[in-house]
Image (spheres, coloured by chain):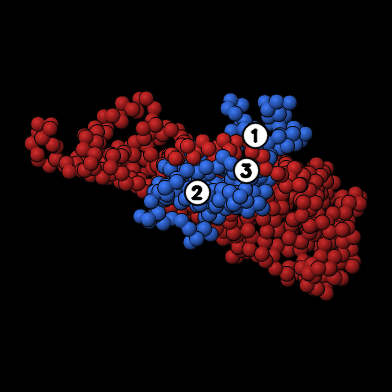
Chain colours: A red, B blue
Amino acid sequence: MSDNDIRKEFQSKLSGFEAPLPPDGWESVERSLRTTAAARRSIRRRWYAGSVAAVLILLVGSILFFQNPMESVETMVSETASTSPFTGSIIDPEIEMASESISGPVVRPVEAGRLLAARSSGKTKTGKQPLVRSSSPEGMLAAWMKREKLQGEDVEKKMDATMLQPVVKPGEKKANQKGEASYEEETITVRGSEEILLAEAGTAERGQGTLLLAVNGRGGLTGYQQTVNTPMTLRSTSATPENKYMMSEANKDLQIQSTNVANNVSEMEHDQPVSFGITVSKYLLDDLSIETGLVYSYLHSKTRNINNNFKVEEVQNLHYLGIPLNVNYNIFSLKRLNVYASVGGMIEKDLYGEFRKEKEGQVTANFNTSSEGTEEKEITKISQRNPQISVNAGVGLSYPIYDRLRVYGKVGGAYYFDAKNQYKTIYSDRKIVMDINVGLRYEF
Amino acid sequence: MDDSQLVIACKKQDRNAQKVLYERYAPMMMAVCLRYSGEEETARDLLHDGFIRVFTQIGSFSGKGSFEGWLRRIFVNLALENYRKEKQKYRFMEEYSYINADELETPADDALDIENIPREEVLDMIRNLPPGYRTVFNMYIFEEMSHKEIAEVLGINEAASRSQFFRAKNMLRKKISAILHNDKRQVQ
């Protein structure tokens, strides 16, 4: 009996055979389907919500940042001008001394419109209004609304500044005189408007509109290395048509090499990119800041094509200047250590580039020439046609080292979009580059 | 409601249509699951998971081929995935050894005569084969796969597939012979 006969026999025997079902079969399937559908809906909703939130954050952040970038500086100047005469009268020297004895930015110049409470420490609250933590969603919303309200009232309040007589309540004065190491919210009443504002200690340290200046250095965590039999060059095949002609001329040697692929060894290497930059950040909300600046990057690449007859080496150096735009969010703080996440993008353009090529070797008998060695060197200045755009994300830590100076480090990765440029770089060949970014940040 | 209408309704996640489809095809698919699994509990799990997969992936059914064939492939694939997961357990029990010379001797009566054996018993015979033999036997006989294809799917070599099929046949032959022998005795 052949295997085919066995096959036919078994197939015909069990064809259309139906087995009894488990009693709760459909109910169980239906339950699972409901759960699956709910889970899918939930994932979809979260995805939509996340996307909308990200878009909104970027949109609002960009509008606020670009709409009036100098406003905060001007405001600060006018604040100082209008409030400096009041500083002495608002805050009792004793209070000031008591406050100053506590570390951190203690007393800020107080303006009529924006009343900042002196920072103290501890947990006692003298304010009459419920405390809303600025790091909570309610707190962020409240801070946002407060800021908007204050901005609207700034002009009016400044006009009346000379007429307003802020009063510090006696109870608070007493508390401060005692020098209690207590965390306080002070209620300052502005005579005339009867407006009571609360400021949470700590928010003054990182209030909205605070500017941060940072210098940083960035290094790629990995390079790129490739070894193949076929000849390679740093000039990309995805170049524009006019470059293709140039390529064919320039790579004649490589074409000669390719006739003898079996003996050919080609290596391409892109070093880790190294960058330095200076950036400025602005807090939009208590924990959310937007960052931009200038970043210089150095890219170094080389190829080596060796076979029995030829040795061709190419070295390429490119110097890029980029403008990053990142949104940083402070996820949480462990004592003085801040942990933050960052997403954003960068546009880069090369400023200067150099392409060096060295050829040495013997031309084969096929070309009817002598077998003497030849050596050629060629150095050309190069530039990439298109700007390089990338998106990045990362997680970082920052820690205060002196006063308002913080050291920070970030680990992340960037995805580089294909810029269709003539010269290959680590950006074009690796696409995703993991990097580490360290720097110093100063808060104004 | 014919299959194509049923499929369209199921693509819209119509719960009633899903129930109709389940009631129409579940008994047949349960037989497939039982053929691939030794334990009834495993077969039930396969049936359940298979229908979840059917209803979540029904959008990918183009409607060109046979719906029953598409459905069956889902269940067979699921059974094979399950086998691959469980394979480590079976590894030491059976069957990746090659055939001994004495095993290669074909019995005088090499037929697998199942004509007079009830379908349930035939199914039980297959289910009672060791997992590796059973899987190869099912793939070769019912899915009409070659030993090369079976070897690729199960990650074994072709010779191992042949040897397992050979042993499966021998085991079935003995069982068939025992059943027929018992039946004759009972008649006498």
The local crowd at label 2, few if under 14, some if 14 to 19, many if 20 or more residues have their Cα within 10 Å, is: many
Q: Amino acid at mark 1?
A: Ile
The local crowd at label 3, few if under 14, some if 14 to 19, many if 20 or more residues have their Cα within 10 Å, is: few
Say whether disc 1 or disc 3 marks the residue closer to the N-terminus: 1
Q: Which residue is mark 2?
A: B173
Residue A350 position, x and y percent, is 43, 39
Q: Which residue lies at the image location 84% right of the left edge and 68% below the top edge?
A: A124
Q: What number is the disc on residue B58?
A: 1
Task: Specify whether residue A154 is in view.
Answer: no
Q: Which residue lies at the image location 12% right of the left edge and 32% below the top edge?
A: A366
Q: Amino acid at mark 2?
A: Arg
Which residue is the extreme one toward the left? A370
Left or right: A401 with respect to A434?
A: right
The quadrant the C terminus of chain A occupies is bottom right
Q: Secondary structure at mark 1?
A: helix
Q: What number is the disc on residue A285?
A: none
Across the whole image, how many numbered discs are drawn on residues? 3
Q: Which residue lies at the image location 41% right of the left edge and 34% below the top edge?
A: A421
Q: Secondary structure at mark 2?
A: helix
Q: Which residue lies at the image location 59% right of the left edge and 33% below the top edge?
A: B69
Residue A48 position, x and y percent, is 70, 39
Q: Which residue is mark 3?
A: B118
Q: Amino acid at mark 3?
A: Pro
